[in-house]
Amino acid sequence: MPNEIQTEAPAKAASIAEMLRENTPDIDCTMTRTIRTYNLAIENRLTANRNRLVMLGLFGLLAVVHSWPLAGDLAHLSRLDNDDAALNTWIIAWTAHILPLAPWRLFEAPIFYPELHTLAYSEHMFVPSVMGAPLLWAGAGPVLVHNLLFLAGLGASGFAMCLVMTRWTGSRSAGVIAGLLYGFNAHVLMRFPHLQAQHAEFFPIMLYAMDRVLTRNAPRDRWLLAATFALQSLCSNYFLVFSTFALVVAAAVRWNEWLPRNRRPTLASLGLAGVAGTLAVAPLLWPYYQVRTGQGLVRSLDEVARYSARWQDYLATGAQVHEWWSHPFVNGNAALFPGVIGVVLAAVAVGSGLAWRDPRARMATAFGVVGVCFSFGPAFPGYAFLHTHLPLLTSMRAAARWGWLGLVAVAILGGFGAAVIERQGWLARWRRPVMVLLALLVTAEALRAPVGFTYFSGVPAIYDRLAATSPLVLAEFPFYSGPRANGNGPYVLNNTRYFAPLVNGYSGFEPDTYVERARHLETFPETEAITVLRALGVTHVTVHVTAFAQRSGAEALESVGLRPELHLLAEDGGIRLYQVR
């Protein structure tokens, strides 16, 4: 019996296999097609990833080109001639310093001592600061980290727009052109001292997520929308306002995709994403509310009007190729010239009707128009009303920066316009050269390099002594406030060496209590100033010899050393360090 089973089993197995082959002849073909499809999908994904890496490298290289010669000496070249750059460098260093120690004290920064919530006098730049924190923890200098973050933001912003527009248009060339118009426009390249202006990399992805919620409404789309809104908002308070208005306007012009009764789940998703994004941002907005209510951080309409756009700003650019005619229009408020190629490509999108037919182009057109109108501040009808009744606007001083939304719209429409040109049948033979030429023209038209930088030789060595001093409350002289407050910029940068309370401060806002305190301290070394120093608990004073003599006179400088309350501890590099007794 066992022998019969052993001989019959193989025969039965062969018979069954033959029967399966005869009755299911398509199985092999189906499996083969499935395997081929799977392999093709993997190959396509690998190709797409390689293309993305190439694009990332391209935009990284262009960031170096547009900011040249910054990359040639990242540790020493800087825009510290503008004290906004010194403030921003200090902010990223302070954030890295305090996060591991006491993150809840982030806004209790050591400048403007003894005021509260002093980081809220400026942009917190939380996301860029967190990006740079590991480098600072590893021992990199604040200026080096600031410059690396600058290049990263510049390149990442263009790359993000490139990815989104490639998806929306189906054309990599159109994506690249849109990324160039977005990442390296006149506004961005004229704001080198403002690190937060370079980090707009989450805005295109936020728009992409918004479109996905309206068209597909998958759970991950609404969370992507909430996350990118929060991340962009935590780069800059201005981006918080711009992102909010852009999303509201985008939703308004695409009302038919969420308002009908059968689209209520989409409306619910938009609401959920809005709530989640707001909750993520709220903890870093609360200190601004406290400063607003407690110390009066509200921009008056007169102040906003001074920093609003003029029509000439839309002809202003720092680009070398346009300098011969554009230079008279540059006034420092904003450079908002979109570029000839950008305007032409956007006009192609409008002329072809795509700006109205495609809902993504339509929402870009809408928020671009709103941005341009609002950039004129109180001169635009209705802005004063919004400024008075919307808390988001009351803290915005530079209304001209609304024009950035107009440049974003030009970049998106320019990408759609490039796609329209690329699809023209008569252009088939010359399609690739034409797209390359357009990209080169956009790059050349925006190029501002070589950019003028100053050389940073490091924080003066005398501050190393302060780093080892405890307790320490420092006041630096000459003491500045009001129109001369930017003189405190170097003092704030020097604070990165010791991060102890500093009576001086530099920001776009000065509380009344600080202004009153400065009025007394500017009499230093008179008894009036010494009395205030003691009342504040100041332990040490520095005197910058040359600047103090120029500001207060040689007699005042000489009398500093005669004050019995001041004991000279050290002098180095033209800076004298005194202990207050």
Image (cartoon, helix red, strand yellow):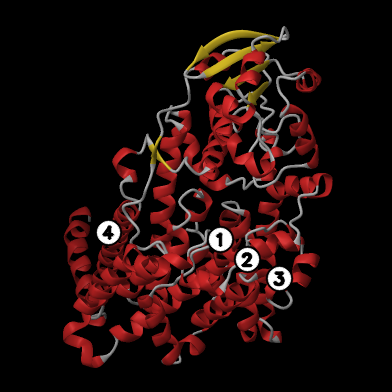
Q: Residues within 10 Å of mark 2 (few under 14, many from 20)?
A: many
Residue 19 appears in the rendering: no
Mark 4 to mark 3: distance in Å? 45 Å
Q: Earlier in the sequence, mark 2 or mark 1?
A: 2
Q: Residue at x 19, y 56 (%)?
A: 6
Residue labelled with disc 3? 378
Mark 4 to mark 2: distance in Å? 39 Å
Picture coordinates of residue 220 (x, y %)? 55, 63
In which image quadrant can residue 447 be found? bottom left
Question: At label 2, which amino acid type do we have?
Answer: Ser
Q: Earlier in the sequence, mark 4 or mark 1?
A: 4
Mark 2 to mark 3: distance in Å? 8 Å
Q: Earlier in the sequence, mark 2 or mark 3?
A: 2
**Residues at marks 2 and 1 touching, judged by CB atoms closer than 8 Å:** yes
Q: Earlier in the sequence, mark 1 or mark 3?
A: 1
**Residue 406 vertical placement versus 306 (above, below):** below
Q: Secondary structure at mark 1?
A: loop
Residue labelled with disc 4? 54
Q: Is residue 57 left or right of residue 296?
A: left
Query: Which image quarter is the C terminus in?
Result: top right
Residue labelled with disc 2? 308
Q: Secondary structure at mark 4?
A: helix
Q: Residue at x 62, y 76 (%)?
A: 373
